[in-house]
Amino acid sequence: EIVLTQSPGTLSLSPGERATLSCRASQIVSGSYIAWYQQKPGQAPRLLIYGASARATDIPDRFSGSGSGTDFTLTISRLDPEDFAVYYCQLYGSSMSTFGQGTKLEIK
Amino acid sequence: EVQLVQTGGGLIQPGGSLRLSCAVSGFIVSANHMSWVRQAAGKGPEWISIIYSGGETYYADSVRGRFTISRDRSKNMVYLEMNVLRADDTAIYYCARDSRPPVWGKGTTVTVSS
């Protein structure tokens, strides 16, 4: 079983600041199947990044993904007020699919 | 246009059965890995099942032996048959294409309660 651990659990930042969210896998995984989602209250998760670094359709370029092996990162270069939400990483595409526990990005 | 249209949710008593359907357009179901993911209120998403393009199926421990994933090539659909439902199966269920990029349906709500 692969476990994805996200850190920090909560990140308090101000609009305009840079956010760095981490997702660590318990064993080496293929970055081709790492995705990041944003979720706001009452809404379905929204795909931001897939394949560790490819932006999904209509996602602003302030969102970027990177990483390989066991360590993956979602970076939001300049926080917009609409970016405050919960973020999940996911390993998908196999019987070892799993989600991280989430990082809550809140306004400081 | 890629679309996954889900139907079949609802209120069901504990111990009951329900079948979720996912009608796909814009790509061929049998050429892709397809998964079901669920999310209980206030919790993070949970992967529960996958059917590979080759037809192999796998399940999370929480549903193995009770849930069955399947597909219909002629209808280009994916299904999740859920039996012996429990209160902790209450969640929004999402059908998903597990490829690049992944695509999710809008979700259907399953409530298990007496």
Image (cartoon, grey):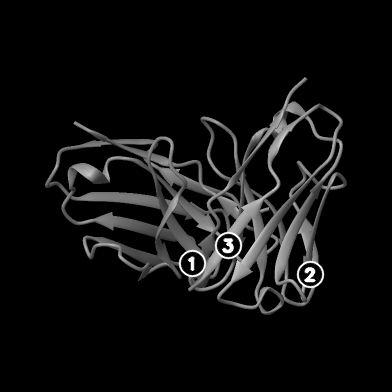
Residue A82 placement (x, y as % from top left): 23, 44
Residue at image x 62%, y 67%?
B24
**Residue that label 2 marks:** B72
Mark nearest the camera among 1 and 2 is 2
Residue at the spot of label 1: A69
Q: Amino acid at mark 3?
A: Leu
User: Crowdedness of circle 2 by 10 Å Cα count: few (<14), some, many (20+)?
Assistant: few
Disc 2: host chain: B
Circle 3 residue: B4
- Name the residue rendered at 77%, 75% in the picture: B73
Sequence-wise, the earlier of marks 3 and 2 is: 3
Q: CA distance from mark 1 to mark 2?
A: 36 Å
Q: Is residue A18 left or right of residue B30?
A: left
Tell me where residue B25 appears, x and y as whole percent: 59, 71
Q: CA distance from mark 3 to mark 2?
A: 14 Å
The crowding category of the residue bearing disc 1, from other C-alpha atoms within 10 Å (few below 14, some 14 to 19, many at least 20), is few
Compared with A98, A31 (above or below) is below
Q: Secondary structure at mark 2?
A: strand
Q: Is residue A28 visible?
A: no
Say if labels 3 and 1 share a chain. Answer: no
- Which marked residue is nearer to the observer: mark 3 or mark 1? 3
Amino acid carrying mark 1 in the image: Gly
Q: Amino acid at mark 2?
A: Asp
* Chain letter of the residue carrying label 1: A
Q: Where on the picture, by quarter, is residue A6?
A: top left
Rounded to the nearest whole Å, what is the CA distance between mark 3 and mark 1? 31 Å
Q: Quadrant of residue B18?
A: top right
Chain of the residue under label 3: B
Name the one closer to the observer, B39 or A35: B39
